[in-house]
Image (cartoon, grey):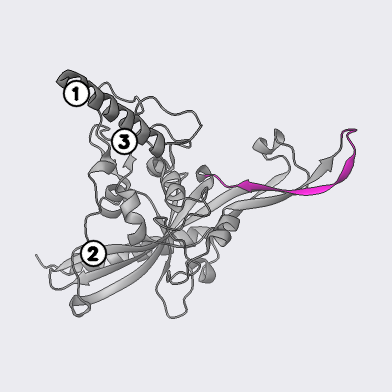
């Protein structure tokens, strides 16, 4: 009798476990049978144990001097390729653009909790609504509507959503400051702005096959809004990035961007009384580059001149 009761309890527990699985995943789509097979050893997901490292505390009274700097990261530069690739998600490996898109979660317009907000202003005070954000990350094209006889009977709108691989540039706003309490020259990123570059057809015609080659198209850029960097950091800290020096020594995007600052960029603006970009008072691209390097040298020399040997 005891054996029968024990067997009945085991069946009940098994059925309860299956019921729980069905409750958690009620999707009718094809489900994975295991975790992504990437390594011959059991891989621990970096997102299971990583949290953003807190910035050192700073008081306004301890800030003796600071600069506000705006810089642009061009993902076409080879040193920035770890931020751009892979263009398609491979197992647990995602690009920075895909990480941001997943954090925003545009595919679920009804979701409002736990998603990354995007702001309309540089001070990150006015967030976009979900509907406004959906409009920003998509392109509306007018295409002809054809009947069964192949004749054009009208037009209709086709909405194409941008992909993470179309993010070519990132703009950063950061503050460099000297903390006299610790006698250190530090930097904190305030906000990041993804810039999408895509092919805009010059005509209203659309062909699904020819669109990949962007026939009769011109390049244009679109800004999708500002992201408060401290709100993005929890998502970056849980996403691995390819370490070009040693892939066994895993890094997160937060390690790469926030602390190691292992990327190439160009300063296009520093805080000034006129609130102008460099290109607004220097027309020549070569001279703009020289001005950017001058600002970099000014900051480097400031830190160097703090010490006497």
Can you identify the residue that label 3 sits on? Answer: 244
Is the residue under label 2 in contact with that under label 3 (CB below 8 Å)? no
Can you identify the residue that label 1 sits on? Answer: 6
Indicate the quadrant where residue 148 lies. top right
Vertical placement of 204 versus 6: above or below? below
Q: Which residues are magenta?
A: 148-163
Is 157 contained in the magenta span?
Answer: yes
Q: Earlier in the sequence, mark 1 or mark 3?
A: 1
Vertical placement of 65 versus 76: above or below? below
The extreme front residue here reads 1
Indicate the quadrant where residue 149 lies. top right
| Depth check, front residue: 306 or 25 | 25
- Could you say where residue 205 lies in the image, as x and y percent from the top left? 78, 44
Tell me if mark 2 has few (under 14), some (14-19) or many (20+) residues whose alpha carbon lies within 10 angstroms of its own.
few
For residue 186, which numbered disc appears in the image?
Answer: 2
- For discs 1 and 3, the disc positioned in front in the rendered view: 1
Residue 46 placement, left or right of 167 = left
Quadrant (top left, top right, bottom left, bottom right) of the C terminus: bottom left
Residue 13 placement, left or right of 191 = left
For label 2, the SS is strand
Q: Residue at x 11, y 68 (%)?
A: 308
């Amino acid at each position: 009798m005891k054996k029968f009761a024990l067997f009945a309890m085991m069946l009940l527990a098994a059925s309860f476990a299956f019921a729980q699985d069905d409750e958690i995943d009620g999707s009718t789509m094809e489900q994975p049978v295991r975790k992504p097979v990437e390594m011959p050893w059991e891989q621990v997901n970096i997102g299971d144990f990583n949290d953003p490292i807190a910035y050192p505390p700073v008081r306004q009274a301890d800030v003796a001097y600071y600069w506000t700097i705006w810089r642009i990261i061009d993902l076409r530069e080879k040193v920035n390729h770890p931020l751009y690739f892979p263009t398609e998600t491979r197992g647990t490996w995602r690009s920075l653009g895909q990480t941001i898109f997943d954090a925003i979660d545009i595919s679920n317009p009804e979701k409002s909790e736990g998603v990354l907000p995007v702001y309309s202003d540089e001070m990150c005070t006015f967030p976009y609504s979900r509907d406004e954000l959906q409009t920003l990350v998509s392109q509306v094209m007018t295409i002809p509507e054809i009947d069964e006889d192949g004749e054009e009977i009208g037009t209709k709108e086709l909405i194409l959503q941008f992909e993470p691989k179309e993010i070519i540039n990132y703009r950063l706003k950061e503050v460099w400051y000297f903390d006299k309490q610790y006698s250190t020259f530090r930097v904190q990123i305030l906000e990041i702005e993804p810039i999408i570059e895509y092919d805009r057809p010059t005509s209203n015609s659309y062909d699904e096959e020819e669109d990949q080659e962007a026939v009769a198209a011109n390049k244009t850029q679109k800004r999708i809004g500002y992201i408060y960097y401290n709100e993005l950091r929890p998502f970056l800290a849980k996403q691995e990035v390819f370490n070009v020096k040693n892939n066994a020594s895993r890094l997160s995007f937060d390690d790469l961007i926030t602390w190691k600052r292992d990327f190439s960029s160009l300063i296009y603006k520093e805080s000034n009384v006129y609130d102008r970009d460099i290109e607004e008072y220097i027309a020549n691209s070569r001279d703009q580059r020289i001005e950017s390097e001058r600002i970099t040298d000014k900051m480097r020399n400031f830190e160097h001149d703090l010490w006497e040997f």
